[in-house]
Image (cartoon, helix red, strand yellow):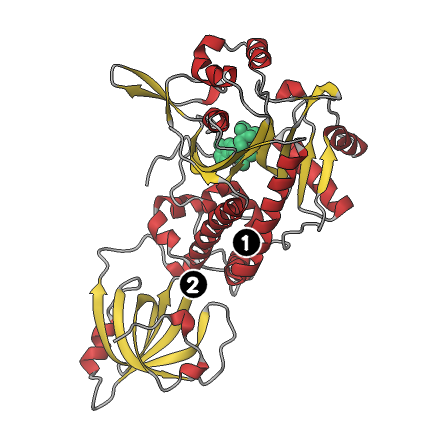
Amino acid sequence: NPRASIASLSESSAGQHLFIRARIHTSRAQGNKMLFLALRQRLSTIQAVLVVNPNTVSKQMVKWAASLPAESIVLVEGTAQQPAVPVESTTISNCEIILQKIHLISGIEGRLPFTLEDAARTAEEYEERDAEGNKVYNSVGLETRLNNRVLDLRTPISQAVFSVQSGVTSLFRSYLESQGFLEIHTPKLQGAATESGASVFKVSYFKGTAFLAQSPQLAKQMAIAADFERVFEIGPVFRAENSLTHRHLTEFTGLDLEMTIEESYEEVVGLLDSLFLHIFSGLNEKFAKEIAVIGKQFPAEPFLWLEKTLRLKWGDAIALLRESGIEIGDFEDLSTEQERTLGALVREKYKTDYYILDKFPLAIRPFYTMPDGADSRYSNSYDFMMRGEEILSGAQRVHDAVFLEQRMREHGIDPASMKGYLDAFKMGVAPHGGGGIGLERVVMLFLKLNNIRRATMFPRDPKRLEP
Ligand code: ATP
Ligand code: MG
Ligand code: MG
Ligand code: MG
């Protein structure tokens, strides 16, 4: 017999004989003859009723079913019926099931650290008051959730978050494939701490030492030198970020791309911009239900973007910040706080949560960044921003081997330590550029989850390597 999916049932399913495998979300007995179960699959729950009936359901059966703890996996058999009062909800089915049989498929050992009902409470429910007027805050803290991540991942909100995350990688991949990009895989074990020694993990490698890749930057450029023309990678990125922030992990998923340039780095910016617009509209189109479910616990203004994306030059951004009273030098990098302030100013002035910050000062960018031909204090490099925070950094890259070596020396990097990379350039490479995106950050900011750990299945930070 086919197993029904709760999400596919509706009032028009009434009368159907169904088999459903699901978890017991909640269970409530009424006397010893009747039991109400909420059965859950991913985002969806359905009300199931077990009631004593001389032909099919005994009192013992009701008693036994009532003793099954929440989160048990059961297989039930029954008949769908229309609920007495129509249910209007994105997660609760507008269909009920009158049970004839219930089998236990997988039970629970011991006590659960929290109930899914508590973990799934919505923002409005936080506002509930008890009889004395005290706020009832019965939800579950982030640390408790992360310590018991598997249970927390079962909440409809987490289920929705990871559907959206999967949507981002799928939209990223399908768009780039449509634009002639090749998916590549570059090594995460490296012989030297290349890009910036400060935040690299050292691992023991037989009798020597290896380093975990802080990005696929060098390898993807070498793929361009090898004539692959347009490449992308979805893979892990490791950074020894030794501080706990809402947006840094020690391991995250990088969405990287690199492409050759015909005339100008505008080609890269244009492609990256179209890619993001494709992702945003794809998410709204395909994940409306998930976004609605998440919004109940993490209320957010809908993510705003413009038909034609705002491009803010570095100088304009600094001017905007100064206008609002912030003291900042012309060539100083922005702090997270300043980034957010800028985001708020941009939202107010231009009505967008997504914009491109362009022409960064050369001095605050990596050695491989191409200087701006018109003013070499600046560079052909950019960050893309969502809700006032960085989600992508990218640039046109230096492709001339002699100049590249000079830039390394100016950055205090010994060219001998990057021989393989430099050699690639000595054999000729087309002008090129690209960018790197943080997957978890895009999900966090699109959904306004406020902490990157919520957008990471099993987050890694300086204090967490488990579970
Ligand atoms: P930040 O300024 O936030 O520290 P960054 O400028 O150091 O980021 P890049 O080296 O430009 O980061 O990396 C490209 C992208 O990777 C960033 O725009 C961001 O989306 C993501 N990213 C960078 N560091 C982390 C991290 N520690 N955890 C999660 N995502 C990150
Ligand atoms: Mg950083
Ligand atoms: Mg940055
Ligand atoms: Mg950056």
Q: Which residue is mark 2?
A: 43
Res. 100 in view: yes
Q: In which quarter of the view is residue 405 placed?
A: top right
286 lies above or below 45: above
- Mark 2 crowdedness (10 Å alpha carbons): few <14, some 14-19, many ≥20: many
Q: Residues within 10 Å of mark 1 (few under 14, many from 20)?
A: some
Q: Quadrant location of residue 420?
A: top left
Name the residue: 38% across, 28% down. Answer: 188
Q: Amino acid at mark 2?
A: Leu
Disc 1 residue type (three-letter): Phe
Above/below status of 259 relative to 132: above
Horizontal and vertical percent position of residue 359 = 70, 28
Q: CA distance from mark 2 to mark 1?
A: 16 Å
Query: Going from the N terminus, do you reach mark 2 or mark 1 first?
Result: 2
**Residue 170 % position (x, y):** 47, 50
**Mark 1 lies on residue:** 298
User: Which residue is outermost to the bottom?
Assistant: 54
Q: Which residue appears at 44% of the width and 46% of the height?
A: 142
- Locate residue 37, reporting x and y percent: 34, 73
| Quarter occupied by the N terminus | bottom left
Image quarter where the C terminus lies is top left
Pointer 2 with pointer 1, Cβ within 8 A: no
Confirm whether residue 299 shows in the render. no
Q: Nearer the viewer, residue 434 or 42?
A: 434
